[in-house]
Image (cartoon, rainbow, N blue to C red):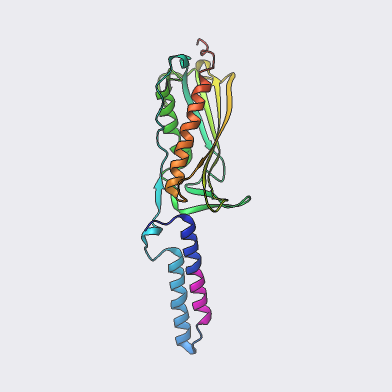
Amino acid sequence: MNMDFSDRMDRRENQTATVEATTQDLVLPGRAARSSARIVCLSAVCLLCGCISRPHLDVRSFAFTVPPASKPNPGYQTHRVVAIRSLRVAAPFDRRSLVYRMDEYSFESDPYAEFFVPASEGLLMPIRSYLRQAGAFETVVEPGSALKPNTVAEFSVLDLYGDFRKQQQGAAILRLRALLFDSPNGIPGKLVLEREYSRCIPLKARTPEALMAGWNKALAQILAQLVSDVGGLEPAPVQ
C-alpha cells in the first residue's frame, strides 16, 4: 500500500504512543514483571526501528531524468566546447534522503525516499545530455576527454526540496546558479555568464513520486532558459 510521507509520520507517531502506553500500564510483581517489561521494551525497539517488514516502509529510490530538448536552433551555435567543472548542492539538500519543508524554519528528511545517487552526481548526466542535444554548444565534453574545452561551466544547486507548508498542496522547489567562463587553453578566464534560475512546480499529489516529477519538470524549464541565455553569448575566443 502506497502512503505519502505525512501518512507514514502519523502512523509512526501512533505506534510510538501505543508502545509507551503499554510500558506505562504494565505493573507485574517480581521476576515475571521484569521479564515482561523487557519483552515489551524489545518489541518497542523492533517496532520503531523497522524490524517488522511492511510494504509501505520499503525505501524507494528516485533519479533525475534527461529532459526532452527542443529542436536545436542554428542561431544558438557559438562554437563553444564546454566542460562542467563542478556541480555542488548546498546543505541541507546534499543528502541522499529527499528533503521536505514543513514550515517557515524547519526541514525534514524522508528515510523512506531517497535519491539513487547523491543529487550532485545525479544531476550531471541530465544536464550534460540536455546541453549536448539542445545545440547551444558545439559539444559538451566528458571528464578526461582529449577534446579541450574553450568554455567552463560551474553549477550550484541552492534549493532542492518539497515545499509542504500548505496543507492542501505541495510544490517542487529547484533553484540553480550557473557560471560560464571563457577557457582558452583549458584555463578558466573571463566570466561570460552568471545567472540564477528558480522554479516552483505545483504537485499533483503529496507523494515522493509527484515531487520527483516536479523536480524533473523544473529542471527542464531551467535548462531551456539557460540554453536561451547561452545563445546570446559571443563566439568563443580563438585558442
Q: Is residue 228 magenta?
A: no
Give x and y (percent) for residue 72.
Answer: 41, 20
Instruction: Farthest residue to the top: give it.
Output: 238
- Magenta span: chief secondary structure: helix
Of the pair 236 and 101, the residue shown nearer to us: 101
Residue 149 placement, left or right of 55: right
Q: Is residue 44 above or below residue 194?
A: below
Give x and y (percent) for residue 133.
Answer: 39, 24
| Residue 87 visible | yes
Instruction: Farthest residue to the bottom: give it.
Output: 29
From the image, which quarter does the N terminus lie in? bottom left
Give x and y (percent) for residue 8.
Answer: 46, 60
Q: Is residue 139 above or below residue 95?
A: above
Give x and y (percent) for residue 213.
Answer: 43, 42
Count of residue discs: 0
Of the pair 142 and 22, the residue shown nearer to us: 22
| Residue 143 visible | no
Extent of the magenta region: 16-25
Residue 63 placement, left or right of 185: left
Picture quadrant where residue 71 is located: top left
At x 57%, y 52%, the residue is 102
Q: Is residue 40 above or below residue 138?
A: below
Instruction: Farthest residue to the front: give it.
Output: 168
Of the pair 194 and 43, the residue shown nearer to us: 194
